[in-house]
Amino acid sequence: MFPRIASVLPQAVLVLALVGVSFGSIFVRLAAAPALAVALWRMTLAAALVVPVAGILRRPGAPSVGALLLAAAAGVLLALHFATWISSLDYTSVARSVLLVNTAPVFVALIAWIIGRDVPAPRIWVAIALALAGVVVMGAEGLDEPGAALGQALALAGAAAMAGYLVLAREAQRSLSYLSYVVTAYGSAAVCLWVAVAATGTVWHGFAAGTWVAIAAMALVSQVIGHGGYNWSLRHLQPAYVSLALTGEPVIAAALAWWLLGEPVSSGTAAGGALVLAAILLASRSRERRQEPDLS
C-alpha cells in the first residue's frame, strides 16, 4: 500500500501545487498595490514562513557552495519571473496573462535540447505542441486592446524566466535538501526584489488591510503551497513534465477569474483551454520520471 502511495505522491503534490498557483492571479487582482511591491511581499513573506521550518528540520552537514550558488541564481530568475508576470496583469486579462506565462514548457524543452539533458520523449513533444496550439488560440484575441502587446510581452518574459528557474532549481536540488534549496532561492528572490524596489522608488507600504490579506494569502497559498509543491515535484519528475502539467493553470485561473472577479471567458479562451487540457492528459499518461536516485 505504502509503495503505491509513494509512487503517486509526486503527481498528487503537483495537483495541489497547480490549484495553489492558479489562485495567484486572483490574489494579484485583489491586491491594490504596485506590481513590484506585490512581488516583493510575496517572496519576503514566503521566505519568512519557510525559514523557521528549515531551521527546525535542518540536516547535519554543510551544503556545497556550488549548489547554494545555483539556488541563489534560481532565486534571481524567480524574482524576475514574478516582477514581469505580475506586471503583465496591469495590461491584459488574467486568462491571457496566465496562459502566456505558462508557455514555460517550450523554453524548458529548448534549454534541455541545447544542454543535452532531459530531452522530452516524443509524447511530451506532442503534448507541448498541443499546449502551444492552445496558447495561440487564446493569445490571438485582444491584441488590438491598449497595452495588450506590452502585457503579453511581460507574460512571455515571465515564462522565459520561469523556464530558466526550473532548470537551475533541479540542478541545485541534486545536492541540496528541499528546505535548504527553498530558503536559499526564496531568500535570494526577496533580496533581489528589495533592491529593485529601492532602485525604482516603488511604494512598498501603507496599503489597505484588504491588500495585505491578499498578499499574505498569495504568499501562503500560491507561493509556499503552490510553488513549494512545484519545487518538491522537481525532485521526482522531469522539468518538462512538471512545467507542462502546470499549463492547466490558465484554465483554472480563467475559471476563477470568471467566477470571483466577473472576467468573461471568451470562445477563444475556451477552445484554447480544451487543447491545453488535452496536452496535460497526454503528458500525465506518459509519466516521464527521472531515473536518478530519490533526493528526498
Image (cartoon, rainbow, N blue to C red):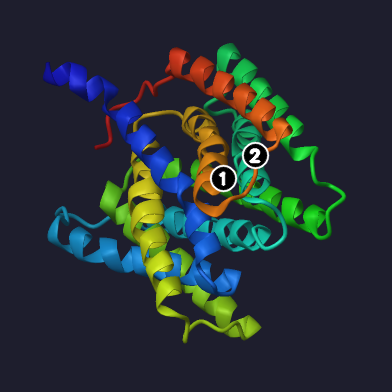
Quarter of the image for the N terminus: give it: top left
Residue drawn at point x = 47 percent, y = 59 percent: 27
Instruction: Report the amino acid beneath label 2.
Output: Val
Image quarter hosting the C terminus = top left
Which of these two is toward me, 4 or 142? 142
Q: Is mark 1 on a helix, strand or loop?
A: helix
Residue 60 on image: x %, y %: 14, 54
Numbered label attached to residue 258 = 1
* Spatial separation of the CA atoms under disc 1 and disc 2: 7 Å
Image coordinates of residue 167 in percent, x first then y, are: 51, 41
Query: In the figure, is residue 239 to the left or right of 4?
Result: right
Q: Is 210 displayed left or right of 193 in the figure?
A: left
Residue that carries the numbered disc 2 in the rendered image: 265
Is residue 130 left or right of 19 when viewed as pictured? right
Crowd class of label 1 (few under 14; some 14 to 19; many from 20; radius 10 Å): some
Task: State if disc 2 and disc 1 touch (CB < 8 Å).
Answer: yes
Residue beneath the point at 21% across and 59% down: 54
Where residue 73 sits in the image (x, y, percent)? 50, 58
Circle 2 residues within 10 Å: few <14, some 14–19, many ≥20: some
Q: Is residue 283 visible?
A: yes
Q: Which mark is residue 216?
A: none
SS of the residue at dot 2? Answer: loop
Foreground pick, 251 / 197: 251
